Image (tube, helix red, strand yellow):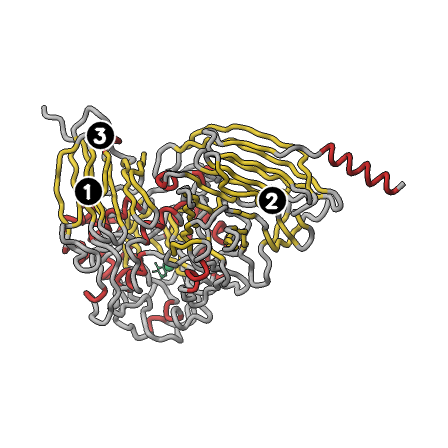
Amino acid sequence: MKKTFVISTLILTAAMNMAAAEITSPSGDLKLVVDVDAQGVPVYSVDYKGKTLVAPGRLGLVSDETKFTDGFRIVDTDTVTVDRTWQPVWGEYSDVRDHFRELAVKLKADNPDREMTLRFRVFDDGLGFRYELPLQNGPNYLTLKDELTEFNYTDNHTLFAIPGDYDTDEYLWSETTFTELPEALNNYTRHTEAQRTGGTTIQTPMLIKTTDGVYVNAHEAALDGYPAMLLDVDTANYAMKSHLVPDRLGVSAYLQLPFNTPWRTLIVSDDARDILASQLIYNLNEPSKIEDTSWIKPMKFVGVWWEMFTGNEKTWAYSDDHSAKPGVTDYTKLTPNGRHPANTENVKKYIDFAAKHGIDGVLVEGWNEGWEDWAGYRKNRQFLFDKPYPDFDLPALRDYAKEKGVKLIMHHETAANAADYELQLDRAFQFMKDNNYDAVKTGYVGAIIPRSEHHTSQWMVDHAKHVIERAAEYQIMVDSHEAPRPTGLARTYPNWLAQESARGGEFESMGGNPPSHTTILPFTRLKGGPMDYTPGLFETRMSYYNEGKDSQAGTTLARQLALYLTMPSPMQMVCDLPENYERFPDAFQFIKDVPVDWSDSKYLEAEPNRYITVARRDKNSDDWYVGAITDDKARVATIDLSFLPKGEKYVATIYEDAPDADWKENPQAYRIRTVDVKPGQKLKQRLAPGGGAAIRITKKAHKK
Ligand code: NOJ
Ligand code: CA
């Protein structure tokens, strides 16, 4: 009796089992196959142009309460083609096409009863997929321990990667292979207070160049209510598996169903330029939740900032008394250390400079109580976000900035005390509004408080969203540092203008960033969203300030101009000291002119870790701008001006490396020349070792 029952169940199951599901991208170049294996484990594979790109790999989720790993059968599949266009509030394009074929695979398992849908979207430039867990006939609260997503590659491809770390992405990039990865990761030193994963775990976004010359950016989209994903690499089998950032209790996520995970994304092309141009990650995010976006304004800003990095012993702190305690100590009684640039007189100079040169904002770091308990003394870590230091006359500066037509930009360094920041958030944002601030740079330097958490664990992903949503309610724009790396959420929250979440320009004062660094970031980190990289460094040697400092930036001066094109961001810093711009006023003109918001972008040349040439059209005029950068080797960029509309005459102002320029030996040698150019012309542009070129192209006025 029992036997018969089992057999009939099996027959029934077999009868209900559907065949493998398959879809292709609109162009047909990408083919995706989804199936369940003999154990009922969901598997997927991806072909690109007729060749296996990702061999069959498992999909699944593991929680304490239940597992979504095996015993599944496909009970339904659904496909749909979508082709629509949307308009971002800011960005590289004024119109973004969202064109994909979608496959939803509904899975069911018995004993215990479980349901899961795998949703795939295949675009011409890659694919994304996510797990959707509907309400179950079983546990609906999950303590998630693991995600089994596999990415099985087929050969010993080149990898562009940084070490797996739960707390920081501020690393230089390795160009390596699967088999050489362990050695490459051995070369990294651990960041203070950050938790490296060890082993052969790496972070996303990362880039692969296959042995066939196909480029793959692996990342995620719409990270919300879930931890960030790292990748465990099986170097012998050329395989990767998702590694969710856990909290310090070992739990990756606490979920209440129904729940959809973030999208796992692969941007794919055999043309490196397509990786840079791809908007796939934004396409997989939800449209803006902010209805009236008129208050969101892209901007350039200078800052009381670099002074604290130059090695001149300037400090964010007002005094050297490390026993000072915000809210308790009477700061007017402290002895000022005399090395505090966030003082009224100095800030006025920055406001004057910004006003004179048409720079929108002035960031001031070190304006508020709390810095005495910062770096090196950071056990309790608290800042007050409505308590200016005695030498920072906020009402006077507020009025002065207003009179000069300049916006002060707020700084909230939390020293990673995110818990305390949440308590102060409303007061802090109201204080900003009361004082005419509408943008804030946040920071999370140090180990996270609550101490159970990491920078990229679920709690901090939730925190980041909380901050961005509260900021939107106050109509505040945000530039976050040391936050979970972006996954395109700026589409949904366009007040999230920029993030750091990578090794930025600040490291030019701490060992330096080699020229190649900014030729790999656009292929990796930038796919999630703009970076506050802080370009515009004109004085590249720290020995200029202090003989004892030997840090040197991996750049020529001309290359710093090009970064405004190759590292696009709607919140772009003009990072150097005003006095350094005054030394090179003709080169500074480019920074004054360059827009931060674009209606179109054309990637003309690109190879990861080597070079990038890009042309962009200003969103607010017909002007085009071109930026070209190279690694530490000299290069001749070919700038094909086919993007210029025909029937007009144009003039190009070229800011270039002088013939004898070299990032190491002669970084400040540049030339500026003006030439007539025609649509379709191919400009040959020489770039020095570690150099670059920046070009402004305007229509020639018609002769009357
Ligand atoms: C690190 C940030 O990246 C940097 O820009 C900032 O100046 C310091 N933290 C201090 O908040
Ligand atoms: Ca940082």
Viewer-side residue, 306 vs 488: 488
Q: Earlier in the sequence, mark 1 or mark 2?
A: 2
Q: Which amino acid type is marked by label 2?
A: Phe
- The quadrant of the image that shows the N terminus is top right
Residue identified by numbered label 1: 685
Residue at (40, 55) in percent of width and height: 176
Residue identified by numbered label 2: 259
Look at the numbered discs 1 and 2 and tell me whether their residues touch, using CB distance below 8 Å.
no
> SS for tag 1?
strand
> SS for tag 2?
strand
Viewer-side residue, 394 vs 592: 592
Badge 1 crowding class, 10 Å Cα cut-off, few under 14, some 14 to 19, many 20 or more, is: some
Residue identified by numbered label 3: 680
Residue at (13, 26) in percent of width and height: 702
Q: Which amino acid type is marked by label 3?
A: Gly
* CA gap, disc 1 and disc 2: 51 Å
